[in-house]
Image (cartoon, rainbow, N blue to C red):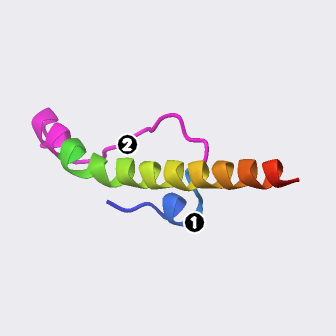
Amino acid sequence: MSSPLLDEAGVEGARGIIINVTGGSDLTLAEVMELDMDRIGWLLERLGDQRKRESREIEQAARRGRRR
């Protein structure tokens, strides 16, 4: 799975995702569901990593604010 949009832009503040699957007329729903289950982990991992970074930034800002 790849997306130039995700490579160039962050996922800061994301609260949901939209998945677009394009295929031929022989593409079955079962194949789409299998693809989603296999590939969605990649995106969820990226979102989780971003949340961790945001949490660390908030904690660091709070610590700096307490020192003042």
**Whole-percent x and y of residue 67?**
82, 54
Give the CA distance from mark 2 to mark 1: 19 Å
Q: Quick check: 14 left or right of 65? A: left
| Along the viewing direction, whichever of 4 and 67 lies nearer the viewer | 67
Q: Nearer the viewer, mark 2 or mark 1?
A: 1
**Whole-percent x and y of residue 54?**
60, 51
> Which residue is pictured at 45% across the width and 38% down the height?
17
Q: Which residues are magenta?
A: 12-34
- Numbered label attached to residue 35: none
Type of amino acid under label 2: Asn
**Whole-percent x and y of residue 62?**
73, 47
| Residue 48 is covered by the magenta coloring | no
Q: Quick check: 60 left or right of 42? A: right
**Whole-percent x and y of residue 59?**
65, 49
* Contact (Cβ within 8 Å) of mark 2 with mark 1: no
Identify residue for label 1: 8
> Which residue is pictured at 50% across the width and 52% down the height?
52
Crowdedness of circle 2 by 10 Å Cα count: few (<14), some, many (20+)?
few
Of pointers 2 and 1, the one earlier in the residue sequence? 1
Label 1's element? helix
Q: Quick check: 51 left or right of 24? A: right
> Which residue is pictured at 37% across the width and 62% down the height?
2
Label 2's element? loop
* Quarter assignment of residue 30: top left
Q: Mainly helix, strand or loop, the magenta region?
A: loop
Identify residue for label 2: 20
Looking at the image, which residue sits at the far right? 68
| Residue 21 is covered by the magenta coloring | yes
